[in-house]
Amino acid sequence: MEQTQYLRKAYYEPTTKNVEKLANFITSISGKPLRVDHLRHYLLKTSWTTKDLTLKARSHLQGGSQYIEQLLTDGIDKHKNVNCLKTAIADITTYVDQLNGNDDTSFVLISTNTLPSTIHFKHAISLFFKKGLSTETNDSYEFDLLVLYALRLSLEKRIHGILKTDFIKSSNNKPVGLRRLIRIAKKLKNINYSEGIKWNQIEWVNDWLNHHIHRNLRPYPWIIFQAIKVMEELLEPKSYETENSKGFSFYGSTTSNDLEILKNEIESKILAEIPNAIIRWAHTHEVQKLK
């Protein structure tokens, strides 16, 4: 059987037509469409069993196809999007081989999914002294890992902002981890969370971020795309409305009628979860008070 050339053609000739054909091909070999919550659950998993490898491949192919379609929507003719497309194609070939095995992948070098420490150090120097990233390593392969640190920072700041805490330590003076803080935040009753916030998915993202950051693994771009979609529900500014007022706020996804009652609940929940916790309160509270 003659090999197809969807990957190769889109890689070397990234026209809209070729990229659309690639996205359709990837979708066609990925099996029955997975529900969004199932897809994100599988993509954000950090360990798999041998019997689940087909499901893993399906989820990566469907996530990859959605990411490529987003690049098409943004405009595949843009230089940065061409670069992102090539990285995605190089990453997804393994899963195409698993479920198809008939498309030409011989042109792609296997990725180690890691980067030398020197490259991370060069990024740090460039960000600090030049206030921008180096043009010497200006592609998706080198930059994507940095996105995880920014996502982790934004999530931790937001959770602490919701709790109005600077830091929380357990009775043995050890800092309380973000996983436990998320567990506290999601149970609060005196706060109104936007319907789009999915706490189980936020917890998946947090575990996935920790896994990749601590192991210094370069993540697949389509998983970063899904992680951003999960977190934007909590972190993006939103409009809010009551019978008496309406507005738009950085913290519109988290509103409360009474911040003092909310703070008392927060303290109670923290001490119930972490007896004798040491709490240092922050000056700002990332919750929009309703008038």
Image: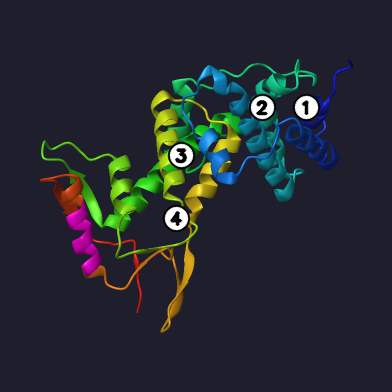
The answer to whether mark 3 and mark 2 are in CB contact below 8 A is no
Please tell me whether residue 132 is drawn above or below residue 100 in the rendered image: below
Label 4 is placed on what type of residue?
A: Leu
Numbered mark located on residue 234 in the image: 4
Question: In the displayed structure, does residue 175 sit left or right of residue 29?
Answer: left
Q: Find disc 2 in the rendering and name its residue.
A: 92
Label 1 is placed on what type of residue?
A: Leu
State which region is magenta: 261-269
The residues tagged by marks 3 and 1 sit, at their Cα atoms, a distance apart of: 34 Å
- Local crowd size for mark 1, using a 10 Å CA cut-off: few (<14), some (14–19), many (≥20): many
Numbered mark located on residue 7 in the image: 1
Question: Which of the 4 quarters of the picture holds residue 103?
Answer: top right
- Residue 184 x/y as whole percent: 28, 50
**Observer-nearest of 27 and 214:** 27
Q: Find disc 3 in the rendering and name its residue.
A: 127
Q: Residue furthest right?
A: 2
